[in-house]
Image (spheres, grey):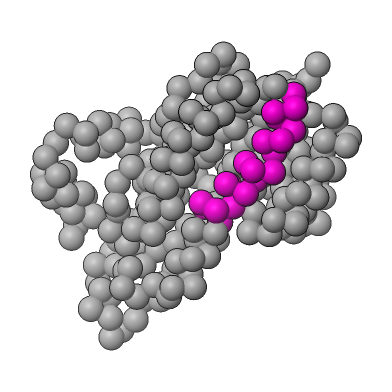
């Protein structure tokens, strides 16, 4: 029996790559988008879902279960970037980012759990970020929202152990996707005390994305996790130095690691 996979944010970028990769391997894949009509040529169905709107989450999961009878794998991939000096970020944008990157995945998980408990099986993969392991300058809110999702997964895993429902995180580094286009950028204000360091950091971030790894690496990692009987708590996928930066954070004194980050960002 083909496993039924639901991927939030499956219309582009990493989500699209994962979906196409799994379809080619005989999985039944459903992706989601806030505007599915924009993707008529998708290789798998794209359903309407906004992770910030509980009604759309419930309706989409209900539709999949009515058609397929089950949901075997949920991949919480929908997310949003945000950049800017924390002092200058509007509170509404900060809350909106957490609504998408943290509360949204939790709401999707809550909606799918009753069905997975009924099946007495299921796998939930939360796509987080290597940025979630450290507070990055001018990406602090993004780091915080992804880091929060990493931690909530640790708690969820223990709460779900009696129901044969597995959960894990996959944290990507920089990948060549269109994420920068959908990111909220605090404007570069001429009068801002952060104008030069923020502008320089923004250019560096965009360069990293443009020269990032092929998203197929994430798809391969997802398939490996799906085929793993007992997934680990955390996985990291990306360039060696990006993954190694997490190791350095664990072993270096805080101030030494902070200086290393500041040198990298030329601050």
Q: Is residue 53 left or right of residue 40?
A: left
Q: Where does the image place residue 266, in percent across and percent down from the top left?
A: 19, 57
Instruction: Choose top left, top right, bottom left or bottom right for residue 90.
Output: bottom left
Q: Is residue 39 visible?
A: no
Residue 216 within the segment the image draws in magenta: no
Which residue shows up at 72% across the image and 50% down it? 57
Tell me residue 240's x, y (percent): 32, 30
- Which residue is most to the right? 67
Residue 2 appears at what percent x and percent y?
78, 20
Q: Name the residue at 80% across, 50% down.
A: 59
Q: Is residue 105 magenta?
A: yes
From what the image shows, is residue 163 above or below residue 174? Answer: above
* 83 in relation to 66, above or below: below
To which quarter of the image does residue 234 belong?
A: top left
Residue 233 location, quadrant: top left
Query: Quick check: 90 above or below 31?
Result: below
Query: Would you say the magenta stretch is mainly helix, strand or loop?
Result: helix
Q: Residue furthest bottom?
A: 191
Q: Nearer the viewer, residue 62 or 212?
A: 62
Classify the position of the C terminus by image quarter: bottom left
Q: Which residues are magenta?
A: 100-119
* Residue 266 seen in render: yes
Q: Position of residue 264 (x, y in %)?
A: 21, 50
Q: Residue at x 59, y 52 (%)?
A: 104
């Amino acid at each position: 029996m083909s496993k039924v996979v639901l991927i939030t944010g499956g219309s582009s970028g990493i989500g699209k790559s994962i979906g196409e990769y799994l379809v080619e391997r005989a999985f039944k894949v459903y992706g989601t988008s806030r505007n599915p009509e924009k993707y008529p040529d998708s290789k798998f169905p794209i359903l309407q879902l906004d992770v910030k709107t509980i009604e759309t989450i419930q309706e989409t999961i209900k539709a999949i279960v009515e058609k397929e009878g089950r949901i075997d794998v949920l991949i919480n991939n929908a997310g949003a970037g945000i950049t800017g000096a924390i002092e200058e970020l509007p509170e509404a944008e900060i809350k909106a980012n957490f609504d998408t990157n943290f509360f949204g995945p939790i709401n999707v998980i809550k909606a799918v759990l009753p069905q997975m408990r009924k099946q007495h099986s299921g796998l939930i993969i939360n796509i987080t970020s290597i940025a979630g392991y450290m507070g990055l300058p001018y990406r602090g809110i993004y780091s915080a929202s992804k880091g929060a999702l990493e931690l909530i997964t640790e708690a969820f895993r223990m709460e779900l152990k009696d129901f044969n429902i597995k959960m894990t995180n996959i944290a990507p580094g920089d990948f060549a996707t269109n994420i920068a286009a959908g990111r909220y950028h605090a404007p570069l204000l001429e009068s801002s005390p952060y104008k030069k360091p923020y502008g320089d950091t923004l250019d560096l971030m965009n360069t990293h994305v443009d020269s990032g790894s092929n998203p197929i690496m994430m798809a391969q990692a997802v398939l490996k996790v799906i085929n793993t009987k007992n997934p680990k708590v955390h996985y990291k996928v990306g360039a060696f130095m990006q993954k190694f930066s997490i190791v350095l954070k664990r072993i270096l004194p805080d101030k030494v690691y902070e200086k290393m980050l500041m040198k990298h960002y030329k601050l």
